[in-house]
Amino acid sequence: MNASDLLKTPLHALHEELGARMVPFAGYAMPVQYPSGILHEHHHCRTAAGLFDVSHMGQLTLRGTGDSAAEALETLVTADLLSLKPGRQRYALLTNDAGGVRDDLMVLRRADHLALVVNAACKDADFEYLKESLPNGVVLTALFDRALLALQGPAAGAVMERLDPKAAEMIFMDGADLSLDGIPAQVTRSGYTGEDGFEISVESRDAEKLARRLLAEQEVAPIGLGARDSLRLEAGLCLYGHDIDTGTSPVEADLVWAIGKRRRREGGFPGADRILRELKDGTQRVRVGLKIQGRQPAREGAEIADNEGRVIGRITSGGFGPTVGAPVAMGYVDRDFAEIGTVVHPVVRGKPLQATVSAFPMVEQRYRRKG
């Protein structure tokens, strides 16, 4: 795709003004880093607050009478949505008939509808699939022209409270309507970094004004895709299309927690037969975290071997973990090698490295779970 063909987010001009290096990502021109560099951006988000442009992601609404929207969406995802209370958000997996993952998404229950955020590379396909699959009376609307910002890090709460004191009342997975220094915003509190954070949906015309207002706070710095990737990798969070895809089941991906307890009993979503069978019997391969000795990272696609050199798996994401202070990775290995502490060998340019299967997250999660 030529640069001229790439879509631009409402913050594109601001990224260029801030000196960002722009790269193609999911059909958009996106900032991969700013002049301070990925390492500095990573540490800044872990110690203060980082501002991410995630406007490339897809925002949707689902409306129906009573619980009809939740009931309809439950036939397509693994989450228990009927128990989701207004003002609360839940992570869900959109599955296919083979038990693979079409997409992973966030679902917020608002007073009169559901608000969804889906991955950028999947949003057009998700919209068409949902539109075809939902019954009459449930109305799906795409809000792809709306902007989405994320403020992440230990100082994010204090910064948000200055703009609207009501932000202080929110806890992990809450959603609320706020007025951020006079700008109307639909806000959730979760995060893709392992840190406390907020996702802020605003009209596109307000995006740059809000971004500049947030960046005016001394704790806030802009963060690009490079640090976003190293942050989520340390946190053990999957990137769709890499760590999970249509050929990966939620059980293989160690995402069992995204299958509601009632859904595990009742099923009723695509691929449930396979997924419920795997919950009972296990899977042949399992997603694991890896800490790698030395300084050489193992990147996506690298084979993983056992002590005898037999291939037992493959890396799906990998790089240097600045907070961990070592190369880190995630990938899939045969279940006999998935136990924490097992030594395995990612193969990089024909050379086997030494790595240890490690628990996720590799850094302490600091979500605000209590008021």
Image (tube, helix red, strand yellow):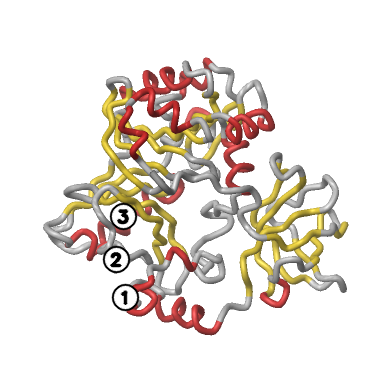
For marks 2 and 3 on the same chain, the one whose residue lies earlier in the sequence = 2
Q: Which residue is mark 3?
A: 128
Q: x, y percentage for residue 247?
A: 53, 67
- The kind of residue on which mark 1 rests is Gly
For marks 1 and 3 on the same chain, the one whose residue lies earlier in the sequence = 3
- The kind of residue on which mark 2 rests is Glu
Q: Which residue is mark 2?
A: 74
| Residue 9 or residue 363, whichever sits in front | 363
**Is 177 located above or below residue 113 in the figure?**
above
| Spatial CA span between label 2 and label 3 | 17 Å
To which quarter of the image does residue 282 belong? bottom right
Asked whether the residues under the numbered discs 1 and 3 touch, taking CB atoms below 8 Å apart as contact, a structural biologist would say: no
Q: x, y percentage for residue 246?
A: 49, 64
Q: x, y percentage for residue 2?
A: 54, 33
Which residue occupies 26% across, 36% down? 177
Q: Which residue is mark 1?
A: 268
- The kind of residue on which mark 3 rests is Glu
Task: Please indicate whether residue 311 sits to the left or right of residue 226 in the image.
Answer: right
Tell me the quarter of the image containing the C terminus.
top left
Task: Please indicate whether residue 234 sits to the left or right of residue 356 in the image.
Answer: left
| Residue 235 or residue 335, whichever sits in front | 235
